Image (cartoon, rainbow, N blue to C red):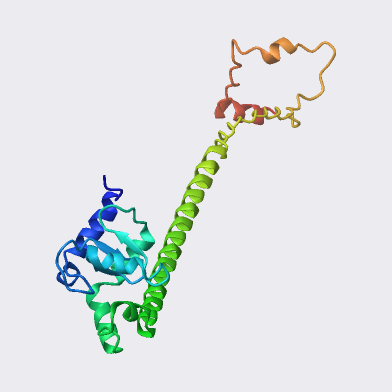
Amino acid sequence: MSALTPQAKAILDRLMSEKANQKCVDCNSKLSVDWASVNLGVFFCIDCSGKHRGLGVHLSFVRSVTMDKWDDKQLAFMQNGGNKPCKDFLKENDAYDLPLKERWSSKAAEKWRKQLREKVESQIAGSKKKSKAKKKAETSESETESETESESEEEPAPKPAPKKVAKPVKAKPTPVVENLIDLGPMDSGGDLDSFFDTSAPAKPKAAEPAKEKKEKKEKK
């Protein structure tokens, strides 16, 4: 039974579908090329896998593509390696045509392992940094939302506006009438009732005729 996770299987299947990885990196055999060296990032056949195991894990860390469990870092080595890039590098440094043991213990192979390791570690560090920054941003956003919700909950309800009470209207004082009508001096026996009697208004005295005035004047 395979110990591969669906994600790991998908990555390895994609890598093994590449033409250069379908042949053993050492003998170019196409049979049972389902073994790999993690720290070299290459695929090889079952026969050459035994020889790689004999080199020691410091030179070649062997894993089965179908039976072993793979973690993210090991998969990163395979994704950044590959049979063609490795072979090209060894050929450029005149190490590929050496016998298998000498090939993988050469300075060129050591340089390749170091270069591959640094590339993977840099990639992982960058991925962790991005993941940390993303987590920090999400945490900050979550805290901001929590503070906003808390402030909304704690904010007191607005007080109703005080009702305006109508001020009592002060009654204006009745003005005192100072200029009274002068009725003049009255005798103790004066008849006030006749003064205020309005039932029969007094008739004005008729003017004397001019003839009578003339006769009176002559008599005098």
Locate residue 82: give its quadrant.
bottom left
Locate residue 172: give its quadrant.
top right
Q: Position of residue 75 (x, y in %)?
A: 32, 62
Judged from this view, the residue extending furthest toward the right is 188
Residue at screen point 24% across, 83% down = 88
Rendered-image quadrant of the N terminus: top left
Q: Is residue 95 above or below residue 194?
A: below
Q: Is residue 164 left or right of residue 22?
A: right
Q: Position of residue 59 (x, y in %)?
A: 39, 72
Of the pair 59 and 8, the residue shown nearer to us: 59
Q: How many marks?
A: 0
Q: Is residue 131 left or right of residue 92?
A: right
Q: Is residue 44 above or below residue 110?
A: above
Of the pair 180 and 31, the residue shown nearer to us: 31
Residue at screen point 66% across, 31% down = 217
Q: Position of residue 4 (x, y in %)?
A: 29, 51
Q: Position of residue 117 (x, y in %)?
A: 40, 73
Rendered-image quadrant of the C terminus: top right
Of the pair 126 and 135, the residue shown nearer to us: 126
Locate residue 85: give its quadrant.
bottom left
Q: Is residue 168 left or right of residue 67?
A: right
Residue at screen point 23% across, 65% down = 47
